[in-house]
Image (cartoon, rainbow, N blue to C red):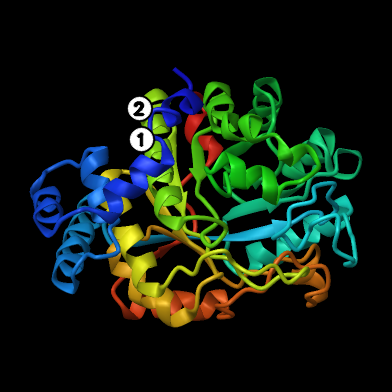
Amino acid sequence: MSFEQQLQQFPQAEILNRILNATPQQIDQALRRPRLNMEDFACLLAPQISDEQLEKIAIRANKITMQRFGRTILLYAPIYLSNECHNGCKYCGFSADNHLSRKTLTMAEIEREAKLLRGKGFRHMLLLTGEAPESAGIDFLEQSIHSVKTHCGSVSIEVFPMDTDEYQRMVAAGVDGLTLYQETYDAELYRDLHPYGPKSDYSYRLAAPERAGEAGLRRIGIGSLLGLGECLSDVFYTGLHALYLARNYWRTQVTISFPRLRPAEGGFQPNSIVSDRQLTQFICALRLLVPDAGLVLSTRESSQLRDNLLPLGITQMSAGSCTAPGGYGEGGHEGEQFAINDERSPEEMVRLLQSKGYDPVWKDWDSAFLNQAC
């Protein structure tokens, strides 16, 4: 059974009804279970949850995180290779409808960005592009990966969806991980938000993590863009998706991100507002549902909120990020995808983590680990 087929077994109206009508007794019962099922998870997403119940969820999330991950936070940085894009996504700064400065980095510029990040300590780098195959397609990505790989231990990609054989090419080039947000699991809303371009194919994007798992990627990250649609059902489906991937591609680590909409070119306004309290609740509930998943919090969020969420399940954080192609070397924001919120430098993040008793990890993986000759 594909994930899309499984998804159809959980109609949105029924899920929202279950979440919005969860009783205090049902929430308490879910909290007592050693392992959540999807009905329990729905209860823990309920907006009517009390402060006392939320505190219990947070305490349990902290305990699970300490057991599974200890006091470590993996630090990574994004490298935007290109902002050229043929998609008409209504919410994205890279949308083809927006009049921004378009740029695709040269191999020399890509290596410069990688060297600068390595100099700041990073050994995990995430490569991002828009969707313009003639400017930044598969061949371009392979070259970029080879260039970046010489400066870090682990390379991940956050690019356009691919076929299985193309993901296999990424693995062969040295890619360890994939990040691919479905944006929203509401198919009707998805079609409205993506009126044209390759990204308008909802089913092809939804199945991409499965193709990546079949290709043997070591880490697959998913998430929904909070604020696009009904956040309660989107977070429920994100949890369902994470469990599906963990069970069907057990050699692959699943990670979950919690991106909230940020100001971007085009001025798109969120369809829903996710409060800090809700975001905290979502993170804790997902930690209980998927204990072994990596939970990622980027510089979209404020420094204060990121600091406060540290003990509640987060295992990976970006630092010192720039969302414009060439932004590290050129020091500008022109052509950025969205505005970041936490502008602290990597050095400041390291000091903060250490002051709170955490161990900032620059490197937790290297392809040399698989070298049988070692």
Rendered-image quadrant of the N terminus: top left
Task: Please give the name of the residue rendered at 35% of the width and 59% of the height, measured from the top-left corner.
Answer: 283
Task: Please give the name of the residue rendered at 78% of the width and 68% of the height, measured from the top-left corner.
Answer: 266
Q: Which residue is mark 2?
A: 247
Q: Determine whether 233 is above or below 113 in the image.
A: above
The percent position of residue 274, horizontal first and vertical second, equals 45, 68
Q: Is residue 177 left or right of residue 104?
A: left
| Residue 243, numbered label | 1
| Residue 73, numbered label | none
The image quadrant that residue 142 belongs to is top right
Residue 293 visible, this angle: no
Residue 152 visible, this angle: yes
The percent position of residue 152, horizontal first and vertical second, equals 62, 51
Q: Determine whether 369 is above or below 222 in the image.
A: above
Mark 1 belongs to which amino acid? Answer: Leu
State the SS at label 2: helix
State the SS at label 1: helix
Identify which residue, 134 or 228, lies in the foreground: 228
Task: Please give the name of the residue rendered at 81% of the width and 65% of the height, measured from the top-left corner.
Answer: 326
Q: Is residue 213 left or right of residue 107?
A: left
The image quadrant that residue 122 belongs to is bottom right
Q: Label 1 near label 2: C-beta < 8 Å?
A: yes
Task: Please give the name of the residue rendered at 76% of the width and 68% of the height, measured from the top-left corner.
Answer: 336
Tell me the crowding category of disc 1: few under 14, some 14 to 19, or many 20 or more residues within 10 angstroms, Cα based: some
Mark 2 belongs to which amino acid? Answer: Arg
Q: Give the farthest residue toward the top.
A: 1
